[in-house]
Amino acid sequence: MDYTHLGRTGLSVSRLCLGTMNFGPETTEPDSHAIMDRAHEQGINFFDTANVYGWEKGEGITEQIIGRWFAQGGGRREKTVLATKLYGSMGDWPNETFLSALNIRRACDASLKRLQTDYIDLYQMHHVDRSTPWEEIWEAMEVLRQQGKILYVGSSNFAGWHIAQAQEAARARHFLGLVSEQSIYNLLTRWVELEVLPAVEHYGLGFIPWSPLHGGLLSGALRKEKEGGGSRSGKGRSSESLDEHRETIEAYEQLCADLGEDPAHVGLAWLLSRPGVTAPIIGPRTMEQLDGTLRALDIELSEETLARLDELFPPAGPNGAKPAPEAYAW
């Protein structure tokens, strides 16, 4: 396993991040525990979760599964760089959602209890809160850090200007501020290249792509469709997206076949080759899916292949692979 620093910090994390969103809804607790054990065996030390995962309001089912895994001992907690998130609703009463100082305090204590740990390595805001001033947010995070309950703070689904706003507010308080941003990023969704990635680079944040295979569309969706296998890409929003991009996905799968590689591995390898990317979040539902992803670490895409991928999946903006404003101006 390869490791890198999380942004400008000294924290070392694996180049793949284990996403746990399927633990509970899709993957049983015993299987989830086995997957986490295997991740450690493979050198993956970076785990991502959220208080809302499990999708039963207020329960934090996925955090509970991870907490019971930590409780087994054997260095499981010590070997893990643990990232979780707050923002989403954990109850029906006021102040059980968003980023007020009150909810930050309560949400953190609740996550710690479910996770059966006394600290969170990376505490992430799942979404920007447009109604709470940064002075309040940062003061609450500073208190948690002083108490030893969190070590670092990250963001998720922030626009570039939100990152700048957050960092300048932190700078005024002489606080470390954000150390990472987590956004959707894959061959089909490249909007972050316009302003988010430039902001991340400027402020020294690590970048953690979620949905690296676009809900399974980039994992061989058409091949699985022909084989009659079940796939997330055949459901709901992913199904509509598959119909929209069918011709492109067909060409992509043919390119991967010509390379002799699995489409899922090529999609992850492309992300790993992108400047500023720390660790794509992989969300295995099975042990086989986890084991297969390691191949992506060994794939080196040629300039010719990268150029072909840009042809199939053009960068956002009419002017090619350029950040804003050059992407749409001069």
Image (cartoon, rainbow, N blue to C red):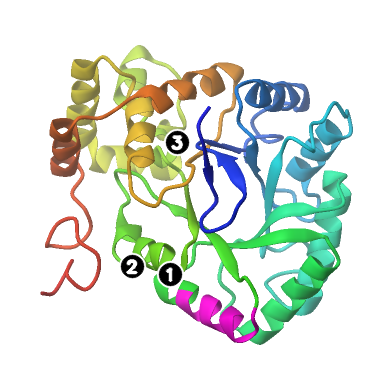
Q: Is residue 178 left or right of residue 250?
A: right
In this rendered view, identify the residue nearer to me: 73 or 124: 73
The residues colored magenta run 164-174
Q: Which residue is mark 1?
A: 159
Q: Bin the neighbour count of mark 3 within 10 Å (Cα to Cα): few under 14, some 14-19, many 20 and up.
A: few
* Image coords of residue 222 (percent x, y): 30, 24
| Quadrant hosting residue 143 | bottom right
Position of residue 211 relative to residue 150, above or below, is above
* Image coords of residue 52 (percent x, y): 70, 53
Mark 3 or mark 1, whichever is nearer to me: 1
Q: Is residue 169 left or right of residue 295?
A: right
Instruction: Give me the residue at 68% from left, 43% from top.
Output: 81
| Residues at marks 3 and 1 touching, judged by CB atoms closer than 8 Å | no
| Quadrant hosting residue 40 | top right
Asked whether 166 falls inside the magenta stretch, the response is yes
Identity, as a three-letter code, of the amino acid under mark 3: Lys
Instruction: Give me the residue at 13% from left, 42% from top.
Output: 311
Position of residue 71 relative to residue 117, above or below, is above
| Residues at marks 1 and 2 touching, judged by CB atoms closer than 8 Å | yes
Identity, as a three-letter code, of the amino acid under mark 2: Glu
Q: Which residue is mark 2?
A: 195
Q: Which residue is mark 3?
A: 235
Q: CA distance from mark 3 to mark 2?
A: 31 Å
